[in-house]
Image (cartoon, rainbow, N blue to C red):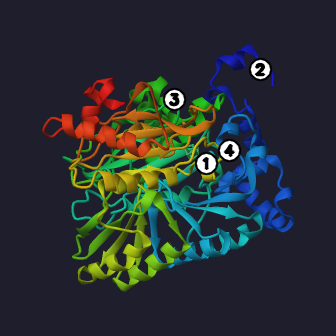
Amino acid sequence: MTSTPRQQRTHGQWAIDGPEPLNPNEEFKAAAGGLGVRQRVLDTYAREGFDSIPADDLHGRLRWWGLYTQRRQDIDGSRTGTLGPDELSDRYFMMRVRLDGGAVTTGQLRTLAGISADFARGTADISDRQNIQYHWIRIEDVPEIWARLEAAGMQTTEACGDTPRVILGSPVAGIAADEIIDPSPAIAGIVERFIGDPELANLPRKFKSAITGHPSLDVVHQINDISLVGVAHPELGSGYDLWVGGGLSVAPRLAERLGAFVRPDQAVEVWYGVVRLFRDYGYRRLRNKARLKFLLADWGPERFREVLEHEYLGYALADGPAPVPSGGPGDHVGVHAQKDGRVWVGLAPTVGRVSAEVLATLADAAEAAGSGRVRFTPQQKLLVLDVDPGRTDDLLAAVEPLGLTANPSPFRRSTMACTGIEFCKLAFVETKATAAHTIGELERRLEGVDVGAPISLHVNGCPNSCARIQVADIGLKGQLIKGPDGSEEFAYQVHLGGGLASADRDDAGLGRTVRGLKVTAADLPDYVERVTRAFVAAREPGESFAQWAHRAEEGALR
Ligand code: SF4
């Protein structure tokens, strides 16, 4: 595609430069919207099969309905960077079910379990955005899956693609005694009014949202495009503090406060204003500059707020206070009293991996304990809500054989892993099995060692940071390295001492790297054991792993 000198100077912002598409992604979105592919799946692709899907739909628009082709099983990580999507793709799909706020009923859990058993070879992963992800989905089965999901009140609409993705929500919304504000109405309002709205279905890139009213700051609000975080305004009562422009991947940036207070009745409109601002002013020329964080970096929070108020809201927001973290760890694992006298039970599946059997059995066990509701968390964990306190032990005993525990070791509790080479076309290395093996080793080797607060271990298969490399105590970025015999080995570049704001820490920031430090998958348990023991030996009273990692000499981190 040729471009004029004028075009080269622009960022491709619709509101300034006009809607002419400036790259292949923008061209296919302009040619036909992503949402329209649904009808072609129903009318043609599901009937005529995989080979009937043209490339723009296969690798582009199907994402608008939560479908990506999964990685071919016979292609190793050394070819990830050199092959095109056709060569990397299997004839099966990953399907993402968006679960806004991570909330499901036990009836919906059974529907999710049934789809997994009937169409996904029993697979199901809890993603770190509170979704359920399946693998091995055939295009022929998609209409039936949609029908089952929609009959049960769930959807895959805009679960992927350049759209408003799933809204992260506090897993303890409406049940925690120390909650500042219940975000459920705001989340429901956004989903009902705007998810699937064609006006918001061609954004420059993905748009991630998070809303919480819990003081533990449990929705990773610093790494979303927009976050509404519960605060108590001294004159105006409970509402939200507005954050924008966070995101990780290859150019990580923490979100910034606009200093604006959002009343509960303004929350949906403010979200709508920010997403339209992104649609109109977001950078569309270069895909790797298209997330909202790049616009915020250029504008700054003051100008961003001014444009939001003047061009989108038509009124000024009040100034407001910053959130004050409190209320314990934001993963909500363990048994906790609800405000109504019942309890929630936070359980830790290993690196988010569950299955048809786990989901179905969990639904039965939850109901037997008096519960009808489960919530998934942004830490790949799950909560059973509304449990009868007298039946907690029965629930714990019923889920223990499923690998679900409310009392996990520090490493089982705080390890996350992305999909990795098992199914992801962008991956260089394996993740979930490596992480699970490492957890088992660390539990054995470090039994009885007091590490203080759990040390978070985030394992990623490539630099894209789906499992949040840069905001973990120990973040691992997958890459291949040459082993001693010249063959390629799974390895990770190590980031140390990252973390987000929480009740446990006020030093949110990105992790540091250590020159030349790479760890092979085989050596990972040794490395984490070594660096953990070094921390335990050298820490000052009250010092966190992250604080130590930022002050330690490089030699202590190797
Ligand atoms: Fe795939 Fe990379 Fe995301 Fe992991 S971090 S799921 S390998 S894109």
Q: Looking at the image, is mark 1 or mark 4 nearer the viewer?
A: 4
- Res 383 quadrant in image: bottom left
**Mark 3 in CB contact with mark 2 (< 8 angstroms):** no
Residue that mark 4 sits on: 76
Give the residue displayed 38% in from the left and 42% down from the top. 526
Q: Nearer the viewer, residue 20 or 290?
A: 290
Residue that mark 2 sits on: 3
How packed is label 3: few (under 14 Cα within 10 Å), some, or many (20 or more)?
some
Q: Nearer the viewer, residue 189 or 33?
A: 33
Q: Is mark 1 within 8 Å of ligand 1?
A: yes
| Amino acid identity at mark 4 | Asp
**Mark 2 in CB contact with mark 4 (< 8 angstroms):** no
Q: Secondary structure at mark 2?
A: loop
Cα distance between the residues tagged 1 and 4: 8 Å
Give the image location of residue 551, x and y in percent.
Answer: 26, 26
Cα distance between the residues tagged 2 and 4: 37 Å
Q: Which mark is residue 294?
A: 3
382, above or below 514, in the image: below
First of labels 1, 4 by sequence position = 4
Cα distance between the residues tagged 1 and 2: 37 Å
Q: Secondary structure at mark 4?
A: loop
| Amino acid identity at mark 1 | Ile
Residue that mark 1 sits on: 421
Q: Secondary structure at mark 3?
A: helix
218, above or below 399, in the image: above
